[in-house]
Amino acid sequence: MTGQRDGPLIVLDDDPTGTQAMENVPVLLEWDDTLVRAALRSRPPALHLLTNSRAFPPARAAEIVRGAAQAAVDALGRPRLVLRGDSTLRAHLLEEYLAVRDIAFPGRTPPLLLVPALPHAGRITVGGVHLLVQGAPTSSSARRRRLSASSRATSRQGACRRRTQRGACSSSAARTCR
């Protein structure tokens, strides 16, 4: 990245669970540059744009994320952007990354850092397997069994490869996250 970016962190959040864990951070359920500027008047450290993109098919998810990124760029010029998804990597990884890249980083390829862990909720990844802190794979938990078949992989690296269809995940994505 060239140069330090100042200002709040703009979080494009694919699901309301991450937003619910925040405190004293404004959340927008719809956005444009005017709404983003208005939400930032009180100078919060971050602003969440709740895209809920995980609930949509990949092409629609990309369109939603592209719109959120465009609103942030229009409001701030060069915002600090983060795509936030859940620790089980159920988001539309490639489509959302490309949407942000194309709007906020035209002609460049910023790094994609996957951190498949949420220690506060008792979920970590060791050796590419998503675990509950008690040590059982999340794939064996009651909650996980309720998830769609497309996200039931126990290997986070394998799940990432399938979701991006390119093998875009390095082995570092599968290393221990604590």
Image (tube, rainbow, N blue to C red):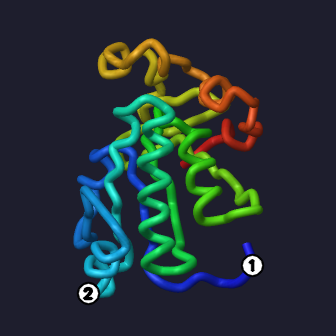
Q: Amino acid at mark 1?
A: Thr
Q: Quadrant of residue 171?
A: top right
Q: Quadrant of the N terminus?
A: bottom right
Residue at numbered disc 2: 42
**Residues under numbered marks 1 and 2 in contact, where contact means CB atoms less than 8 Å apart:** no
65 or 112, which is in the foreground?
65
Residue lying at 45% horizontally and 70% vertically, measured from the top left: 72
**Figure check: 140 above or below 126:** above
Q: Residues within 10 Å of mark 2 (few under 14, many from 20)?
A: few
Real-space CA distance between mark 1 and mark 2, rounded to the nearest whole angstrom = 28 Å
Spot occupied by residue 37 in the image (x, y as percentages of width and height):
33, 80
In the displayed structure image, the side of residue 103 where residue 85 appears, left or right: left
59 or 92, which is in the foreground?
59
- Residue 12 circle label: none
Can residue 17 be spotted in the picture?
Answer: yes
Q: Residues within 10 Å of mark 1 (few under 14, many from 20)?
A: few
Q: Secondary structure at mark 1?
A: loop
In the displayed structure image, the side of residue 41 where residue 109 appears, left or right: right
Q: Secondary structure at mark 2?
A: loop
- Residue 2 circle label: 1
**Figure check: 108 above or below 74:** above
